[in-house]
Image (cartoon, helix red, strand yellow):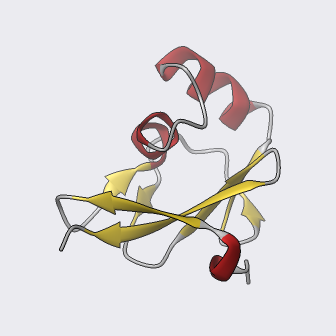
């Protein structure tokens, strides 16, 4: 399991967000095309496992890591 204590929180409005959107919103990539590329290249991990589905649904507590930078999904308060 990934260590969420070192991760920056990414607040989301709904119950879930798709991986590609989270990468953009968390400023880990510039745009959707870059998100697709890093995901297809196996560079993105979700909860410590490589994730190759851009449409993967992320929920509260999921940790996304790219290039050693992690974000944790949290609902907006």
> Residue at position x 47%, y 38% from top?
20
**73 above or below 17?**
below
User: How many circles with numbers are drawn on the protein?
Assistant: 0
Name the side, left or right, on which 14 lies relative to 59: left
In this picture, is 21 found above or below 31? Answer: below
> 45 left or right of 33?
right
Residue 25 rendering spot, x and y as whole percentages: 41, 39
Q: Position of residue 13 (x, y in %)?
A: 17, 58
Figure check: 11 above or below 33? below
- Which quarter of the figure is the C terminus placed in? bottom left
User: Residue 10, how many percent across, how many down?
Assistant: 42, 59
The residue located at (17%, 61%) in the rendering is: 14
Residue 70, quarter of the rendered image: bottom right
The percent position of residue 27, horizontal first and vertical second, equals 52, 36
Picture layout, residue 10 above or below residue 74: above
Closer to the camera, 5 or 40? 5
Residue at the image point whose x is 82% and y is 53% from the top: 68
62 horizontally vs 69: left or right? left
């Amino acid at each position: 399991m990934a260590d969420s204590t070192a991760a920056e929180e990414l607040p989301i409005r709904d119950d879930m967000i798709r991986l590609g959107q989270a990468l953009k919103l968390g400023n880990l990539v510039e745009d959707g095309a870059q998100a697709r590329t890093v995901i297809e290249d196996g560079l993105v991990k979700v909860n410590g496992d490589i994730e190759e589905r851009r449409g993967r649904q992320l929920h509260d507590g999921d940790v996304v890591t790219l290039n050693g930078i992690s974000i944790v999904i949290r609902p907006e308060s």
